[in-house]
Amino acid sequence: MKIAVLSRNPNLYSTRRLVEAGRERGHEVRVIDTLRAYMNIASHKPSIHYKGEELEPFDAVIPRIGASITFYGAAVLRQFEMMGVFPLNESVAISRSRDKLRSLQLLSRKGVGLPVTGFAHSPDDIPDLISMVGGAPLVIKLLEGTQGIGVVMCETEKAAESVLEAFMGLKANIMVQEYIREAGGADIRCLVVGEKVIAAMKRQAKPGEFRSNLHRGGSASLIKITPEERMTAVRAAKVMGLNVAGVDILRSNHGPVVMEVNSSPGLEGIESTTGKDVAGLIIEYIEKNARPNQTRTRGKG
Ligand code: ADP
């Protein structure tokens, strides 16, 4: 098969591994820099140009679109979809998953366990918003944040009120969440491919920190997840419409709760922690599922 990997940087671990795994299995794999792909969107015959040439046809495309270029990346991926190329994850599902609030609303609609979460616009509604999520301690999150930046824990209601007022004053989009203390600064990253969790790791925050992001000094280790956690991760990916996803789960007193569903999960931490050939399993998924013109929306979404 001919596989395109949409990625800004061929040297990133995840990109390198996907290229390697594809070639090992006898496929032709080419990395396309997302921001150098351009197109005539009004043409009757959809095509993509790249650094001055028209791109050859591909059977499948693996999107690795960074959060900062979601808008342009989704447009490029949509063009691939209009050309009938099989996307590992569809553009519509990626755009959906990049909006944290919309994701939680979709998951909630389908009954997936979530931390109690609130969202408001007016500072006048702060006191009720805080009581709605059960009072302090609570977590305030910037909707645009990644890698734990913009996630703040407030021990008291007074602190929460002032942080919320400050963020609202800056016109930032925020949500307020119950703090899952019993998670003990740990979360579980489940790597879902198709309808299976193919690898899982626990991430533990460093002492004195509640955010377990590896970028924030968290450490990863192997973990055996429960059938309920497994089912929650698979359902979350499915609700989002993602074939491949990194589902972040917290162990709460009311069962597993989903914090986030990631559409371009990093492979380095999960492969080195679990020893699993995640990239190989992703290529295998493409081999089994790639068909032309099979996207649910075919670029319509
Ligand atoms: P980001 O997308 O920036 O990584 P997250 O929402 O995943 O932001 O939060 C970062 C980390 O903070 C999580 O990995 C988790 O360890 C911790 N965390 C986030 N929300 C909660 C919460 N409601 N209760 C307890 N810990 C949380």
Image (spheres, rainbow, N blue to C red):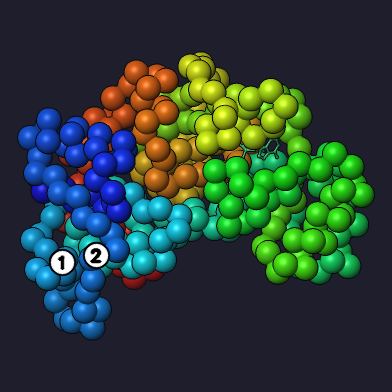
Spot the residue most to the bottom: 42
Query: Which mark, by number, is residue 51?
Result: 1
| Count of marks placed on residues | 2
Is residue 37 shown to the viewer in this render?
Answer: yes
Q: Nearer the viewer, residue 231 or 38?
A: 38
Label 2 crowd bin: few (<14), some (14–19), many (20+), radius 10 Å:
few
Q: Name the kind of residue labelled 1 in the image.
A: Lys
Residue at (25% x, 78% y) in the render: 41
Quadrant (top left, top right, bottom left, bottom right) of the N terminus: top left
Q: In this view, does 282 lie above or below 261?
A: above
Q: Name the kind of residue labelled 2 in the image.
A: Arg
Q: Nearer the viewer, residue 279 or 194?
A: 279
Q: Ligand 1: give its quadrant.
A: top right
How far, Cα to Cα, is label 1 from label 2?
A: 6 Å
Query: Which mark, by number, is residue 36?
Result: 2
Residue at (12% x, 32% y) in the render: 25
Image side of residue 76 versus residue 191, left or right: left
Residue at (74% x, 33% y) in the render: 180
Image side of residue 136 versus residue 85, left or right: right
Quadrant (top left, top right, bottom left, bottom right) of the C terminus: bottom left
Residue at (36% x, 53% y) in the render: 65
Image side of residue 244 versus residue 135, left or right: left
Query: Which mark, by number, is residue 289?
Result: none
Residue 54 in the image, given as x and y percentages of width and height: 10, 68
Q: Is residue 274 above or below residue 39?
A: above
Residue 216 in the image, given as x and y percentages of width and height: 58, 35
Residues at badges 1 and 2 in contact (C-beta under 8 Å)? yes
Is residue 285 shown to the viewer in this render?
Answer: no
Q: Nearer the viewer, residue 85 or 212?
A: 212
Q: In this view, does 203 lie above or below 107?
A: above
